[in-house]
Amino acid sequence: MAVSGVLANVPWWKSGIVYQIYPWSFQDTTGDGVGDIPGILARLDHLCDLGVDAVWLSPVYVSPMADFGYDIADYRDVDPRFGTLADLDRLIAELHARGMKLIMDFVPNHTSDEHPWFLESSSSRDNPRADWYIWHDPAPDGGPPNNWRSMFGGIGWKWCEARGQWYYHAFLDKQPDLNWRNPKVVAAMHDVLRFWLARGVDGFRVDVIWHLLKDPDFRDNPPNPDWTPDEPEVRHILQIMTCDQPGVIDLVKGFREVLDEFPDKVLIGEVYLTIERMCAYYGEALDGAHLPFNFHLLMDPWKAEMIGWLIEEYERRLPPGAWPNWVLGNHDNARVATRLGPAQARVAAVYLLTARGTPTLFQGDEIGLTNGVIPPDKVRDPQEKNEPGLPGHDRDIARTPMQWDASPYAGFSSVEPWLPLVPGWETVNVAAESADPASMLSLHKRLIALRRKHPALSIGEVRVLTAAGDLLAFERSLDGERFVVAMNFGSELIETSVPAASGGQIVLSAKGGRDGEIVGKRLTLAGDDALVIAFG
Ligand code: NOJ
């Protein structure tokens, strides 16, 4: 969407809103029950109506789909399930024509075991790509070289007969890890970035960026004393030899240098880390990722005090000049409307879209989609298949199809979709919610419109006013424009004094029905409500 005024001088990825599209589940046009790029093209009006600025597209590259596209067999082409390279070029052009950007997913930690690089690397010990993956001789007993585990359960090593060696895979054995200590790998992947940047993409979301390097001495990971049996097996050990290794930031800086060969691109990095470690990925001179993903709304308890602390801790730890970001949902985690419940999901939407920092919105969260209900015979997620039944482990629940209208298969497809629709889709869909001013979709549209209209809400400063009990109140301000956001994390009425809010006018409430009210000396906030209060 076009920007003007003070925002015109701010990079688009600071003032804008990112919307994640999971291509498997956005819109099917070919009648195979799986979404595709022509489907995305057919639904661009939804993105315009919503008012988002950029699409982050989960992988659409050629892939055997063992991990739903995060196992890439060709980094330079589109998987036929999703369409063609020409379709993707059209998507870039059509998004640009509407003032929107396209952020591609980039998966550098591993390839598919069907990628030609791996086929060659695994064929012998002395082929030209012998050192492109993480190979190791067996332990003295012939077993795997150390105790490294796969994130998806089981040992992280697979035996290769042709080489008489093991290879390491942080995820599936069909996703061998590349050897990022090999400069040829670095150069080849930089060329992949250039290939897409030259086609006009506006940036990358880099998959598991904190995994890229592993301990060069292959030392064991130590046991995790806090592991409990309801957690995935990989948490048995602390990943201190396999993640967030010294030197990994230099690889991030290398990506950034390539992006900087082109104007106005964004580098987003996936990092599930503490705020302190996450902030390291900006680079000391802001020469790393523009936005290392902040997943703390997904990882930490949804409590007023916690979120107040997070805001302040984040602001304290950000390197000078670094720009924050917030994420409420993605294709790897339970849906926010289920995690927090439908009422608090509205409060959380108010937070996401009034927070200081670029918001990333996951498709379906704008209509309040809850977790899918996946019968055992319909499970597709390899993580769930390997370690069934662990709480919060099944990722299919967040990947169910978009629900567009009340027609058969919710307008997503003409046939049964690859994953089931969420029960209640006849009313929880874009068409029904567009017609209802009280819907989750209408709330999102109003919040986004407000954020777009008032730069204080996007690029302004933030100050936490109070974070105690069930109340979080914070202020956003810029050039004399000021807002107070007050959120009730509980279901009881709060009546209190928030001096910074008094005299302001309510311009939006999560529950509705309070627009135009002037806040007096006392602030009343219904249970599960959040208010945006404007001054001046
Ligand atoms: C993170 C991605 O978001 C997830 O879906 C994938 O399984 C892993 N990385 C491995 O690529």
Image (cartoon, helix red, strand yellow):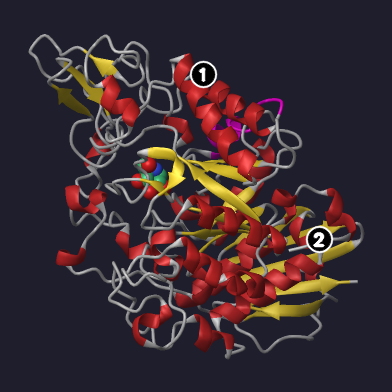
Vertical placement of 16 versus 404: above or below? above
- The disc at residue 3 is 2
Q: Nearer the viewer, residue 48 or 426?
A: 48
Give the magenta-colored segment's residue range: 275-285
| Residue occupying image coordinates x 15% and y 18% | 162
Q: Percent x, y for residue 74?
A: 40, 38
Residue at the spot x=37%, y=40% of the render?
Answer: 72
Q: Which amino acid does label 2 sit on?
A: Val
Residue position for label 1:
247
Q: Is residue 237 above or below residue 403?
A: above
* Mark 1 residue element: loop
Which badge, 2 or 1, is on the more N-terminal residue? 2
Q: Does the magenta stretch include residue 280?
A: yes
**How busy is the neighbourhood of tag 1: few (under 14 within 10 Å), some, or many (20 plus)?**
few
Query: Residue 136: which quarter of the image?
Result: top left
Dividing the image into 4 quarters, which one contains the N terminus?
bottom right
Residue found at the far front of this picture? 86
Q: What element carries label 2?
A: loop
